[in-house]
Image (cartoon, rainbow, N blue to C red):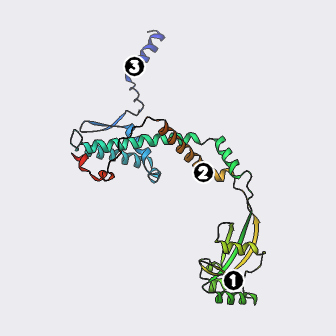
């Protein structure tokens, strides 16, 4: 037998004995059948997409098995609903489909609105010419009456440690922390408190200041120039604003351009409570 014949024969043997490769899974690949109803891989993927984020942290095998089991159970249960479907069921499915499709349209509009150019333009508009102003680091001692506030101020003037007195006497939540309020900007405190802080120099104490919370003795610790947030720090906020504006504009434009005929004039709104209309 020639060498070519031997090689050809060997190739035939390999062809006959090598099993065919399994077909690559597709969306239509059937993963289970329940009483003749197929469940496909595509359905499993779609269900996974709809799961809340906390479920996606599960390991792949557990999630795969859980999704498949859920679809099997749902299919078995759905088969118990009498056919043809009732008017109520058909209407419920129609409204759910409408909600899903409209939400898909909104998601597409929202996603398209967020581009690098749009983000940069909105950032420049919002923060490009903004004077960030001043931030203040202050502490306070909060008491119930003016008399108590004057007594606190007298102790401090006598050399008592501010943080110690605050821990001892302040009724505010910052008391256990020595009255320290941390850093804050204008607009973050009630007006009488803010006005008193702005009037102080670093290290100074205020006279008693009354607000809706009680009476304060305030100590301005230090000030600093506020900084403008970066684009990365504001990206989510700006993206949300772009999406909101785009969605509102699209909904308005679509409804204004649509041919709409309203036939509900004179209809009593209480009619929506009449569930018998969809149960018959």
Q: Nearer the viewer, mark 1 or mark 2?
A: 1
Location of residue 173 by image quarter: bottom right
Residue reaching furthest front?
266
Q: Which callout, 2 or 3, points at the residue further toward the start of the chain? A: 3
Residues under labels 1 and 2: Cα distance? 41 Å
Q: Could you tell me residue 190's position as x and y percent?
A: 64, 72
The residue carrying pointer 3 sits among few (fewer than 14), some (14 to 19) or many (20 or more) residues within 10 Å by Cα, namely few
Disc number placed over residue 236 in the picture, else none: 2
Q: Which callout, 1 or 2, points at the residue further toward the start of the chain? A: 1
Q: Nearer the viewer, mark 2 or mark 3?
A: 2
The residue carrying pointer 2 sits among few (fewer than 14), some (14 to 19) or many (20 or more) residues within 10 Å by Cα, namely few
Is 36 rendered above or below residue 56?
Answer: above
The residue carrying pointer 1 sits among few (fewer than 14), some (14 to 19) or many (20 or more) residues within 10 Å by Cα, namely many
C-beta proximity under 8 Å, tags 1 and 2 = no
Total numbered badges shown on the rendered structure:
3
C-beta proximity under 8 Å, tags 2 and 3 = no
Residue at numbered disc 1? 208
Q: Could you tell me residue 97's position as x and y percent?
A: 37, 41
Q: Secondary structure at mark 2?
A: helix
| Depth order, front residue of 91/266 | 266
Residues under labels 2 and 3: Cα distance? 62 Å
Q: Could you tell me residue 242's position as x and y percent?
A: 59, 46
Q: Nearer the viewer, mark 3 or mark 1?
A: 1
Residue at numbered disc 3? 13
Is 220 placed left or right of 41 in the picture?
Answer: right
| Depth order, front residue of 219/47 | 219
Q: Which callout, 3 or 1, points at the residue further toward the start of the chain? A: 3
Location of residue 11 by image quarter: top left
């Amino acid at each position: 037998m020639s060498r070519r014949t031997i090689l050809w024969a060997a190739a035939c043997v390999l062809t006959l004995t090598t099993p065919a490769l399994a077909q690559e899974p597709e969306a239509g690949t059937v993963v289970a059948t329940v009483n003749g109803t197929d469940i496909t891989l595509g359905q499993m993927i779609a269900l996974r997409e709809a799961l809340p984020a906390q479920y996606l942290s599960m390991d792949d095998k557990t999630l795969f098995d859980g999704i498949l089991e859920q679809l099997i159970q749902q299919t078995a249960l759905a088969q118990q609903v009498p056919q043809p479907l009732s008017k109520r069921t058909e209407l419920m499915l129609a409204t759910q489909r409408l909600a899903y499709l409209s939400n898909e349209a909104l998601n597409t509009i929202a996603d398209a609105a967020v581009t690098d150019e749009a983000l940069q333009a909105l950032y420049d508009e919002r923060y490009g010419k903004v004077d960030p102003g001043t931030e203040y680091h202050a502490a306070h001692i909060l008491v119930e009456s003016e008399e108590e506030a004057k007594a606190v101020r007298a102790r401090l003037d006598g050399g008592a440690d501010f943080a110690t007195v605050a821990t001892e006497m302040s009724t505010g939540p910052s008391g256990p922390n020595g009255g320290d309020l941390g850093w804050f900007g204008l607009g973050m405190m009630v007006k009488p408190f803010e006005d008193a802080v702005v009037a102080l120099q670093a290290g100074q104490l205020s006279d008693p200041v009354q607000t809706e919370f009680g009476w304060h003795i305030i100590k301005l610790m230090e000030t600093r120039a506020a900084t403008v947030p970066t684009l990365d720090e504001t990206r989510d906020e700006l993206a949300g604003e772009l999406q909101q504006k785009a969605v509102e504009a699209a909904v308005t434009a679509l409804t204004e351009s649509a041919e709409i005929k309203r036939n509900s004039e004179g209809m009593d709104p209480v009619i929506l409570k009449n569930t018998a209309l969809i149960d018959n």
